[in-house]
Amino acid sequence: MHELSIAYNLVEVAEKAAIEAKAIRVQAVYLRLGMLTGIVKDALLFGYDVAVQGTLLEGSQLVVEELPVIVYCAVCKTETILPDIQHFRCSLCNTPTGDIRQGKELELASLEVVDEAPDS
Amino acid sequence: MKPRILEITQGVLEKNDRLAQALRTRFKASEVYVINMVSSPGTGKTAFLEATLRMLIAEGHPAAALVGDLETENDAKRLARSGAAVRQILTGGNCHLEAEMIETNLQDWDLNELEYLFIENVGNLVCPASYDLGESLRLVLLSVTEGEDKPLKYPTVFNSAAAAIITKADLAEAVEFDREAALENIESVRPGMVVIETSAKKGQGMEQWLAYLKAQRQKQYPTAKAVVGVK
């Protein structure tokens, strides 16, 4: 699986942002994860603990917000949440729809950082 | 000191996406149509690609292929028999191709001399879905020997692809392939998806596939001329 390589990408992006903001340590990383990315949260959390070693993120917590798939139905003119990702149909009228409005996110949302070393 | 919150909102795969976008711009400038092929191991990507390359080249359409595998150059050797330029990308254990590998391996190829570039991804129905390679078309392949419920098991990859190719159709009867169920499952995870049933071995559906492919290239590059005159 590729969660470890995703975790390395995440740590790289997060560390760069933290350095640019002149933070010295990252306490928490907030990630938005769409259910249609195929990325497994638990595997990502596992990979994260490996990927943070030796970085400003070491010891930080990864907080994952899982986003359900939302599709738009042209008949109902409504966005609905899919109960599962095997059936792309409007939850109201059952019309098939592939108009995906949410669920592909793999985004670093925010970071919780500190600006001084803990013992200073 | 109190921690502070930094609002970021940035794609985790932003680096890959940026590289893929740069590749897409390059491909567009050369009017080369790029196909990213994904499937499980053993679906018959290489046989399908070999047949496709042979047909394109016989008709005078220059085509090339980049082939991703964990190990061995066997696939590149097989594909080279078609007469197309072929280069093997060894990922050394990596389960998918990334845009950077494409960029590195294009090296000295003159894209202006090509009409089609195929990228055969590593056999894997999970990981390749996340990585944009700058392709024009993502193709997912499914063989009749794999089971009709594959689309339901891997909805992400089916959803990230524009068209599905069913391979080894000549074996459908022998393995009691439930065609209706397979088509229904594809439609369920990706309503309106184009599906083409093929057999690279017997030639079934290959003309239809080629017609679809040429039409897609024409759609993307309406003013494109064939690089080598079509006979």
Image: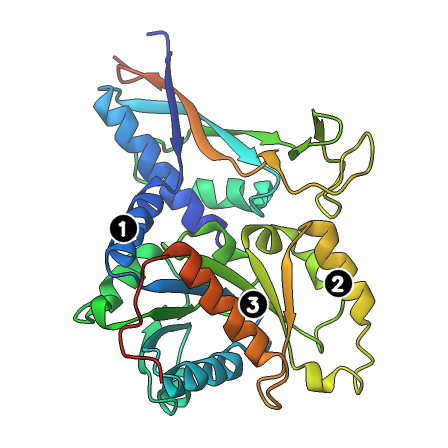
In the image, residue B160 sits, relative to residue A48, either above or below, namely below
Mark 1 and mark 2 lie on one chain; the one further toward the N terminus is: 1
Q: On the picture, is A4 further left or further right than B204?
A: left
Mark 3 and mark 1 lie on one chain; the one further toward the N terminus is: 1
- Residue depicted at 32% across the width and 70% down the height: B115
* Residues under numbered marks 1 and 2 in contact, where contact means CB atoms less than 8 Å apart: no
- Residue depicted at 73% across the width and 35% down the height: A82
Amino acid, disc 1:
Thr
Can the viewer see residue B47? yes
Residue under label 2, please give it. B183
Helix, strand or loop status at disc 3:
loop
Q: Percent position (x, y) of residue B198?
A: 63, 78
Amino acid, disc 2:
Leu
User: Considering the image in quadrants, where does the C terminus of chain A appear?
Assistant: top left
Residue under label 1, please give it. B25
Residue under disc 3 on the same chain as residue under disc 2: yes
- Residue depicted at 33% across the width and 83% down the height: B84
Residue under label 3, please give it. B39
- Residue depicted at 65% across the width and 64% down the height: B195
